[in-house]
Image (tube, rainbow, N blue to C red):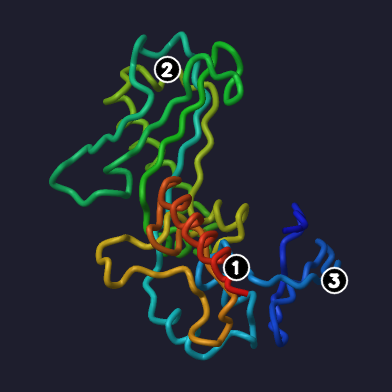
Amino acid sequence: MEGRCCSSMPSSAWSWPAGGCAVWWRARGGEVRGAWPATPSLANQTPWSLLKLLGEDAPPALRRRTQGLPPTWGAFMLYLGLDAAALPPGAAEHHQVVMDLGRPLGEGNSVFLSVSPAADTSRAPWGMRAANLSSHTAVAPWWRLRQLPDGGAAYEARRQRYQEAMLAAAERALPGLRGAVRLQLPATPVTYAHWTARADGMVGGFPQGDLWRARGPRAGLGRQLANLWQVGDSVFPGQSTAGVTLGGMRVARAVLAGWRRG
């Protein structure tokens, strides 16, 4: 098998001529940089982003199926640079903290904290450690606040409240963590939309609560876009590095099996 890897070249549209997919690439200025056939085609996209790429070539059945979908998860993230000497010695590197068992999970009430190993200088300079804090969040409230005519004040206030809540949760696992912070970068669904171009900044995939309603990897239906596959957190088994990896392996096996059959 041969292929081409094109980085920093976001695809602007996919057309679907007979026999396969043509992916159109545009430069920042909007001019077409080129188009290449892609059969089969794998889309690491949310269903809504995939519809946008397909445009008029999106089959009606795929449009209907996507219109009835609820939003996927969003994430509020806090990226920290920590002074290693100010952290409790011998502490575990991964923690799941629930602040109030009587409240729903997410929205800062449940926080996953991961700290890089002290000897890992690929993630933080010597004497420092990198930490990621994450909590599920609904995407819609962030966009409503972002679009208010107050210059972003309400959005910024909510972002600050979430940072404080997550730091408080982290300190239950690692007392004194606030004093170790040397760098603090928050990220909301608005941040993810800007940097990853995912629809509404959704990350984490659909909640997996029912095996009978889980999304499979085939984006097409029947002969409509039969060689178009979805990968990533939007298809079963969904969120997490392990889930996305298993989903990708599943698609790879299916694609290779199709090629072997000719």
Looking at the picture, which amino acid does disc 1 mark? Arg
Q: From what the image shows, is residue 171 above or below residue 26?
A: above
Work out which quarter of the rendered image holds the C terminus and state it. Answer: bottom right
Q: Residue 260 carries which label?
A: 1
Q: Nearer the viewer, residue 87 or 153?
A: 87
Q: What element carries label 3?
A: strand
Q: Nearer the viewer, residue 217 or 90?
A: 217
Q: Does residue 213 appear to the left or right of 59 in the view shown?
A: left
Q: Residue 179 carries which label?
A: 2
Q: What element carries label 1?
A: helix
Query: In this figure, which residue is indicated by the disc labeled 3?
Result: 32
Looking at the picture, which amino acid does disc 2 mark? Gly
Residue at point 57%, 61% (across, down):
44
Q: From what the image shows, is residue 112 above or below residue 57?
A: above
User: Which callout, 3 or 2, points at the residue further toward the start of the chain?
Assistant: 3
Residue at point 35%, 12% (across, down):
88
Q: Which of 83 and 252 is in front in this view?
A: 252
Mark 1 to mark 2 CA distance (whole Å): 58 Å
Question: Which numbered disc, 3 or 2, marks the residue closer to the eye?
Answer: 3
Is residue 147 visible to us here?
no
Q: Which of 154 and 22 is in front in this view?
A: 22
Query: Alpha-carbon neighbours of circle 2 within 10 Å: few (<14), some, or many (≥20)?
Result: few
Q: Give the quarter of the image for residue 55.
A: bottom right
Question: Which numbered disc, 1 or 3, marks the residue closer to the eye?
Answer: 1
Looking at the picture, which amino acid does disc 3 mark? Val
x then y, percent, for residue 27: 82, 63
x then y, percent, for residue 251: 51, 62
Is residue 95 visible to us here?
yes
Q: Give the quarter of the image for residue 112.
A: top left
Residue at point 18%, 40% (across, down):
100
